[in-house]
Image: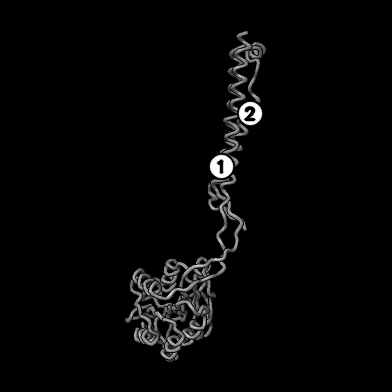
Amino acid sequence: MFTIEKPLYFLLLLLIPLFVVVRHYYLNWQRKKQLEFGNPIALQKIVKFTTVNHEQIRFILFLTILFFSILALVNPKFGAEKNSITAQGVEVVFALDVSKSMLCKDVSPNRLERAKQIISQLVDQLDAERMGMVAYAGNAYPVLPMTTDYALAKMYLQTINTDLISSQGTAINTALKTGVDFFDNPNAGKVLILLSDGEDHEEAAEKAAIYAKDKEVKVLTIGIGTPQGGPIYFIDEYGEPQVKKDKEGKEVVTKLQETVLENIAKNASGSYIYANQTDEVVALVKKEIQSMKKATVKSQQVAQQKSQFQWFLGVALVLFLLDVFFIENKLFSFTQRNKREKNE
């Protein structure tokens, strides 16, 4: 794969034709001035050893140096490779609630987007931790397998929405079991981070939390929403904004169920965190992860593409040195010889 880091610098290539045009008009002006000075035959005798060819060579060299310098500035990148990464870390699985109640706007911009913001910032704080991701509503599905490729994780995170799972509802117990079974390193500390508004339509989450404890998985629950709650906004099949209503035509109000999330965390020897301030949530979760048992983590990770600017910069430097130490000196020697012959 080939990419350009700073394509805007390609605009500098317009300097090359500009310099050509300017030099063309300058040479025409210079030629006219020489003709005004004297007869062309007399001028040719005065300037016996002309340096026009050398000036042309230096000008072409200057344009070539400029061209390669611009290529260095745009910094072409290519040559990705796979590296084996070995480090100390824990395993982290995010379980994200994608039920329709997460579209409630009692937190800005809505519950789901707030949860995704928290996950994104937590991923930025990870060091050598392997992470995976599960999305759940009426059922739970793996979204991202265990990996240390955080850039890939954030890309997958942006694709998650409430249409990801067709079966609606909130099956926290299924999410917990799916998340617990996601871990594959028996020696590493394991933490399952569940982000939800706590609405549980199956009421079996506490048993699943005990299952997580038996598997030595710490569960951190993060409450998204407010106890006062709010209506559920969604876009219908015609692209029109709607508010969810019950069978009687009344607006459905969804509220943060903190008690459910607190009991899950308690039964899994974990902690409940209210997502009031994103920075505080990130700091608390980071502290929990740092306190856990770390194990050697080995994985394959695709390295970033290599910058190739140094090759173009090297060519420009070599041509510059060639101009300074060879062509300019040769031009100087021609001038000196011209003076000596005139003196003779």
The foreground one among 118 and 111 is 118
Q: Specify whether residue 236 is in view.
A: no
Vertical side of 145 occupied by 4: above or below:
above
Point out the tag, 1 or 2, that comes first from the N-terminus. 2
Residue 128: mark in rendering? none
Quadrant (top left/top right/bottom left/bottom right) for the N terminus: bottom right
Q: Residue at x 53, y 49 (%)?
A: 8
The quarter of the picture where residue 294 lies is bottom left
Quadrant (top left/top right/bottom left/bottom right) for the C terminus: top right
The foreground one among 120 and 269 is 269
On the image, the x and y values in percent for residue 221 come to 39, 80
- Contact between marks 1 and 2 (CB within 8 A): the answer is no
Calculate the distance from the C-alpha at mark 1 to the C-alpha at mark 2.
20 Å
Residue on which the image places disc 1: 69
Instruction: Find numbered disc 2 in the image and state the secondary structure of the residue it sits on.
Output: helix
Q: Residue at x 59, y 46 (%)?
A: 311
Give the amino acid type for the residue marked by disc 1 in the picture: Ser
Count of marks overlaid on the render: 2
Q: Specify few, some or many for label 2: CA neighbours under 10 Å numbering under 14, 14-19, or 20 or more.
A: few
Left or right, residue 166 beside residue 267: right
On the image, the x and y values in percent for residue 148 come to 51, 69
The foreground one among 335 and 228 is 335
The foreground one among 295 and 208 is 295
Q: Specify whether residue 229 is in view.
A: yes
Residue on which the image places disc 2: 56
